[in-house]
Image (cartoon, rainbow, N blue to C red):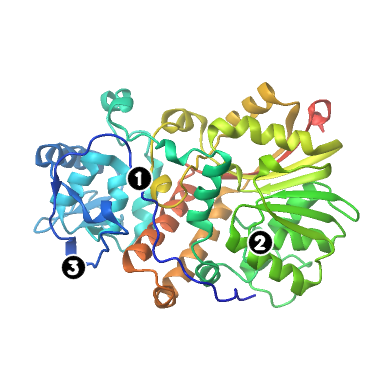
């Protein structure tokens, strides 16, 4: 369904900064004349004045490109890197700014440089997929060992305390329901869809004529509800409402649903959709932190919410789920994951995604989940299914829709810098799944002895 009109929040990035001292500022104009609002995007307007460090960064980038299936084009020079003309081409329009940003803040600066229009590519996903596939080796080993000295640190303001989590969630999910409705499918589902294997028919439980993405989203939701054994009379807790589609499908099964969210915009639309579907008597939507939930539930479901919990609160998150579960209850989670070695290497650093898209976010590894469960709960993983390529396809569809409806995004009041930021975010995420650096998994959690099911 189409989201109701809501007041857009104009281009509101996360403005938290690392505490480290900044080098001198070079107030050069932004490349290619892109209009950038300095109040909304101070670190996009600001270009570091560090020519020596920029020169070092250029050498490191050129060295990395030389061994990758990638081409790098600088003004007035032939492309460097691969000799294969079919490999992705990264075109740098303003080398001084591009390399200075990378020298100062690594991948954060790389993303900000794209937002500023200092580099482009006709195959943005291709460029980012190559980089994601080699992320562990892009930086020379000696510098990797000194990561703690040069990497940006996560700001304490983004800790996911009860108060902090509300602010972090609002900065993304309260941007505007209308924005999300432009690129999501009619189910308003903002998580990985589950597509059928090539050549197999669409799910017979979906209405005839439904668009493939909606069918795939329903298949994903139904699999989670099946994992949690949700049926008539099930008392179901959902942590992370989204826009209400999972709660609606659970209610159609006859479940009694309590679903919690920290997003006022999402709750408003979810309540409207639940009311229009006639399930107000079966679904309760609370504007509440998961730590404040009370009651007893036969099942719990949480879709791509653990990524917003924060590592220090993972034990609390899982203990809360365990506390709320009745004997014999089941928990079905969908989680985006990264390899455990990359989690260990990056868990304390401040990323572009954390700065501009998901403040306070951190992707877990399956190993980390297993360790937290073993140390802090009586829960164990009984089933674990990964489907990362399906997320790449989901993100591709979202990115295509977002690009096609860029004019409508602008009409909502989101400026060009925001649109470039969002395009980079969707492409960056898609590349993570295409490269295999990221995965998405559905996990069934049960109490101890039952974990051998």
> Is 239 in front, or is 198?
239
Q: Which of these two is toward me, 438 or 331?
A: 331
- Separation of residues labelled 3 and 1 (CA atoms): 27 Å
| Residue at 18 percent of width and 66 percent of height | 32
Q: Secondary structure at mark 2?
A: helix
From this view, report whether residue 193 is shown above or below residue 108. Answer: below
Q: Residues within 10 Å of mark 2 (few under 14, many from 20)?
A: many
Q: Which residue is mark 3?
A: 33
Residue 420: percent from the left, percent from the top?
A: 34, 62
Q: Quadrant of the C terminus?
A: top right
Q: Which residue matches tag 1?
A: 131
Element under disc 1: helix
**In this view, the mark in front (3 or 1):** 3
SS category of the residue bearing label 3: helix
Can residue 136 be seen? yes
Image position, residue 364 (x, y; %)? 55, 36
Indicate which disc, 3 or 2, sits on the residue closer to the N terminus.
3
User: Which of the marked residues, 3 or 1, is nearer the chain's N terminus?
Assistant: 3
Mark positioned earlier in the residue sequence (2 or 1): 1
Give the residue drawn at x 55%, y 43%: 163
Q: Name the residue tied to disc 2.
A: 217
Position in image of residue 327 (x %, y %) = 87, 34
CB within 8 Å, label 3 to label 2: no
Query: Which residue shows up at 24% across the image and 52% down it?
Result: 71
């Amino acid at each position: 369904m189409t989201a109701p009109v809501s007041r857009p929040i104009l281009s509101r990035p996360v403005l938290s900064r690392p505490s480290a001292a900044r080098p001198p500022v070079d107030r050069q104009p932004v490349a290619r004349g892109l209009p950038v609002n300095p109040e909304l995007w101070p670190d996009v307007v600001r270009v570091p004045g560090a020519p020596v460090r920029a020169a070092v960064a250029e050498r490191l980038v050129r060295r990395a490109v030389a061994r990758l299936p990638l081409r790098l084009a600088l003004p007035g020079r032939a492309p460097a890197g691969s000799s294969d003309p079919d490999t992705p081409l990264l075109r740098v329009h303003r080398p001084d700014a591009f390399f200075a940003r990378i020298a100062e803040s690594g991948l954060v600066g790389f993303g900000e440089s794209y937002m500023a229009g200092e580099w482009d590519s006709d195959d943005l996903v291709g460029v980012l997929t190559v980089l994601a596939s080699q992320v562990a080796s892009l930086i020379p080993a000696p510098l990797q060992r000194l990561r703690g000295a040069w990497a940006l640190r996560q700001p304490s303001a983004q800790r996911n305390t009860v108060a902090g989590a509300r602010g972090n969630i609002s900065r993304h999910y309260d941007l505007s329901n209308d924005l999300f409705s432009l690129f999501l499918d009619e189910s308003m589902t903002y998580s990985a869809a589950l597509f059928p294997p090539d050549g197999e028919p669409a799910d017979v439980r979906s209405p005839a004529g439904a668009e493939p993405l909606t069918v795939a989203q329903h298949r994903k939701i139904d699999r989670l509800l099946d994992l949690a054994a949700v049926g008539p009379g099930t008392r179901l807790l959902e942590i992370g409402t989204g826009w209400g589609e999972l709660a609606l499908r659970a209610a159609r099964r006859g479940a009694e649903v309590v679903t919690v969210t920290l997003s006022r915009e999402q709750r408003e639309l979810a309540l409207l959709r639940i009311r229009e579907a006639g399930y107000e008597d079966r679904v309760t939507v609370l504007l509440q932190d998961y730590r404040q939930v009370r009651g007893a539930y036969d099942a719990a479901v949480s879709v791509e919410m653990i990524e917003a919990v924060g590592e220090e609160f993972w034990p609390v998150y899982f203990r809360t789920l365990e506390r709320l579960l009745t004997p014999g209850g089941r928990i079905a989670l969908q989680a985006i994951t990264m390899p455990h070695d990359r989690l260990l290497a990056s868990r304390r650093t401040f990323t572009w995604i954390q700065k501009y898209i998901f403040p306070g976010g951190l992707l877990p590894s399956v190993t980390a989940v297993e360790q937290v469960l073993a140390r802090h709960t009586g829960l164990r993983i009984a089933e674990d299914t990964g489907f990362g390529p399906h997320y790449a396809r989901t993100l591709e569809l979202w990115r295509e829709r977002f690009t096609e409806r860029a004019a409508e995004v602008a009409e909502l009041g989101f400026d060009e810098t925001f649109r470039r930021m969002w395009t980079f975010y969707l492409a960056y995420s898609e590349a993570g799944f295409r490269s295999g650096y990221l995965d998405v998994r559905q996990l069934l959690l049960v109490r101890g002895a039952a974990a051998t099911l």
